[in-house]
Amino acid sequence: MFETFRFVRHLHEMLIPLTVGATLEAAEPLRRRLNALREDIDRLTRAGADEILAADLLDYRRRTNSLLLLLACELTRADGTRKISRRGVDLSNTDLSHADLRRVDFTNASLHGARLTYADLRGANLTGADLTQADLTGADLTGAIFDATTADRAI
């Protein structure tokens, strides 16, 4: 029973930024996805203990973090004055398909197994990034920097 409370607490921690993020003007391109994930998590918090404990908490965390990263990019672009830095961040197995990641600094970031299909990575700094098994199908890598980048089995 106490384990259920721990799971629900983690789910509620994900709900707050998704709820607030969806209300922001810059979130318009992501609003549908933010609200869909928020509704899915909210539904799960109201489920029975067995369903809550059977849920893949790590998957919900990954999906939340992916959307919040995209939202951070949108907010930074809306400001227009700041550079986006994701230096050393672990984005393993993150879905960043179709994301606008122009000029993002991914120096030493782990993008192991990330889905970057059709992502706009023009001018991105991928120095030292781990792109092992990342899917870059259709990604625009024009002007991207790849010094010491690991890309074993990347597509």
Image: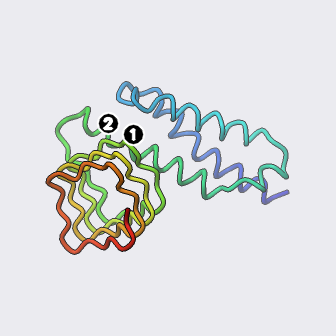
Mark 2 lies on residue: 75
Hey, which residue is sitting farthest left in the picture? 143
Residue, x 72% and y 56% (percent of image)?
6
Q: Are marks 2 and 1 in contact (CB under 8 Å)?
A: yes
Task: Estimate the x, y position of residue 31 in percent, counting from the top left.
Answer: 47, 29
* Label 1, residues with CA under 10 Å away: few <14, some 14-19, many ≥20: many
The foreground one among 118 and 78 is 118
In this picture, is 46 found above or below 92?
above
Quadrant location, the N terminus: bottom right
Q: Amino acid at mark 2?
A: Leu
Give the number of callouts: 2
Write down the quadrant of residue 35 in the picture.
top right
Instruction: Quarter of the image for the C terminus: give it.
Output: bottom left
Q: Is residue 65 left or right of residue 41?
A: left
Residue at x-position 48% and y-position 60%: 93
**In this figure, which residue is indicated by the disc labeled 1?**
71
